[in-house]
Image (spheres, rainbow, N blue to C red):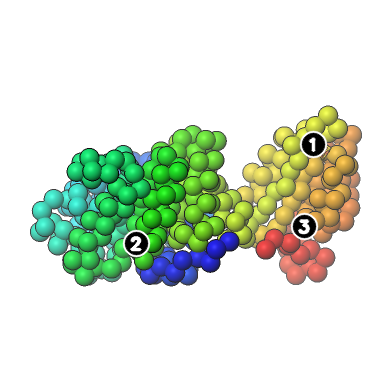
């Protein structure tokens, strides 16, 4: 992994971004923001899954005016997403948004930019410039097409408008639905700007396709040292976005987490390996402490993987062996395996510091 590029640091509520801070996970709610109860409920689910920054769409005044009520009921920083209407940006800032996403070149006259930037500066609130290949300025698209050069050119114009007001708390994203364009755009931008970069593939698709496209785009850049925060955009429950983001960071060794190692299953399996692995994965996502759990269908590779894991299951004839700290622990009926495994995990957690159990995750 290439050393991470040092960007200038900005602060979003109580979370730092860039400048050597950990890569932050963010997501966006899919509720109507003015439905405060539904939005807060979704944010609580996102935070529980590991989301560190959350964005809400503010297309109407009612949405922008809900920012304060939502913020008072959540614990993670809240970002207001504004397009075109500078008054909504002013309202969201007054309501206490911790960051706004706004392209200053899209809000019209200079006086409007001065008002929004002045208030953001007064409250020390960062602004993310979010360039998107689907909504480039007409004259830029005519000159460059929908290319990485076009996305960076657009970002340059927006940044110049903010820096002309001596505003520096800037985050930039350059999203494209084409993964290779996205990668090339961020590579180019990384050489041009020192602002923190927010990574993401836009309109990436449903759960499977979107996860793969985002993982390829985001992970390629992160392993080159590019990127300070990520949002995995999926046509799915936003909690899935956070799970995928966590897995990307864990796979790259940028974050410790719970890793479930499971075999694909084959004719040797004598337990329902798909069901077992799925149940373990779902429950493991809720664990707070890093560990590895192996779920294997038979004795061919089971003991070996279990030996390398903190906890493990190996299938037998409608039964399974539970492993703790790499060693055989006890045999359990297949339908009790997951329940009993998590009892062992929570027992070890309660006796924290047990020298027999050490996570092998780096
Ligand atoms: S661990 Fe056993 S069941 Fe799983 S893929 Fe390997 S041989 Fe097949």
- Give percent across and percent down for residue 241: 50, 45
- Give percent across and percent down for residue 83: 24, 47
Q: Nearer the viewer, residue 264 or 281?
A: 264
CA separation in Å, label 2 and label 3: 44 Å
Q: Earlier in the sequence, mark 2 or mark 1?
A: 2
Say whether residue 3 is left or right of residue 343.
Answer: left
Contact between labelled residues 1 and 2, with CB atoms less than 8 Å apart: no
Q: Which residue is mark 2?
A: 192
Q: Relative to 236, is 45 above or below?
A: below
Q: Earlier in the sequence, mark 1 or mark 3?
A: 3
Q: Which residue is mark 1?
A: 335
- Give percent across and percent down for residue 52: 47, 58
Q: Nearer the viewer, residue 167 or 157?
A: 157
Contact between labelled residues 3 and 2, with CB atoms less than 8 Å apart: no
Q: Residue at x 20, y 57 (%)?
A: 90
Which of the 4 quarters of the picture holds residue 1?
A: bottom right
Q: Secondary structure at mark 3?
A: loop
Residue sticking out furthest to the top:
267
**Label 3 neighbourhood size at 10 Å, few (<14), some (14-19), many (20+)?**
many
Using the rendered image of the protein, determine whether residue 10 is visible from the camera's viewpoint. Answer: yes
Q: Nearer the viewer, mark 2 or mark 1?
A: 2
Q: Nearer the viewer, mark 1 or mark 3?
A: 3
Q: Which mark is residue 310?
A: 3
Ligand 1 image position (quadrant): top right
**Label 2 neighbourhood size at 10 Å, few (<14), some (14-19), many (20+)?**
few
Q: Relative to 146, is 258 above or below?
A: below
- Give percent across and percent down for residue 282: 64, 44
Q: Secondary structure at mark 2?
A: helix
CA separation in Å, label 2 and label 1: 57 Å
Using the rendered image of the protein, determine whether residue 233 is visible from the camera's viewpoint. Answer: no
Q: Secondary structure at mark 1?
A: helix
């Amino acid at each position: 992994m290439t050393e991470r590029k040092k960007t200038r640091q900005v602060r979003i509520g109580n979370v730092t971004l860039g400048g050597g801070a950990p890569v932050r996970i963010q997501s966006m709610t899919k509720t109507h923001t003015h439905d405060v109860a539904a939005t807060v409920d979704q944010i609580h689910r996102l935070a529980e899954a590991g989301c560190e920054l959350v964005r809400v769409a503010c297309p109407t005044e009612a949405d922008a005016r809900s920012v304060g009520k939502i913020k008072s009921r959540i614990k993670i920083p809240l970002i207001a997403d504004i397009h075109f209407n500078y008054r909504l940006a002013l309202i969201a800032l007054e309501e206490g948004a911790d960051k706004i996403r706004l392209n200053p070149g899209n809000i019209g006259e200079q006086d409007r930019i001065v008002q929004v930037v002045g208030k953001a500066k007064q409250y020390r609130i960062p602004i993310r410039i979010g360039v998107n290949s689907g909504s480039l300025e007409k004259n830029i698209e005519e000159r460059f097409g929908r290319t990485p050069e076009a996305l960076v050119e657009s970002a340059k114009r927006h940044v110049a408008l903010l820096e002309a007001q001596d505003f520096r708390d800037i985050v930039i994203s350059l999203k494209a639905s084409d993964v290779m364009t996205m990668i090339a755009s961020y590579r180019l931008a990384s050489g041009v700007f020192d602002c923190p970069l927010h990574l993401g593939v836009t309109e990436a698709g449903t759960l499977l396709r979107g996860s793969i496209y985002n993982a390829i785009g985001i992970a390629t850049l992160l392993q080159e040292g590019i990127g300070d925060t990520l949002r995995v955009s999926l046509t799915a429950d936003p909690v899935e976005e956070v799970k995928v983001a966590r897995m990307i960071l864990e796979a790259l060794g940028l974050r410790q987490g719970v890793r479930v190692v499971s075999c694909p299953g084959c004719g040797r399996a004598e337990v329902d390996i798909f069901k077992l692995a799925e149940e373990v994965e779902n429950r493991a996502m809720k664990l707070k402490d890093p560990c590895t759990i192996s779920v294997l269908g038979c004795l061919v590779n089971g003991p070996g993987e279990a030996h390398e894991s903190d906890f493990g299951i190996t299938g037998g004839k409608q039964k399974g062996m539970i492993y703790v700290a790499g060693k055989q622990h006890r045999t359990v009926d297949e339908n009790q395996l997951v329940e009993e495994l998590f009892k062992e995990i929570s027992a070890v957690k309660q006796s924290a510091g047990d020298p027999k159990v050490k996570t092998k995750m780096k």
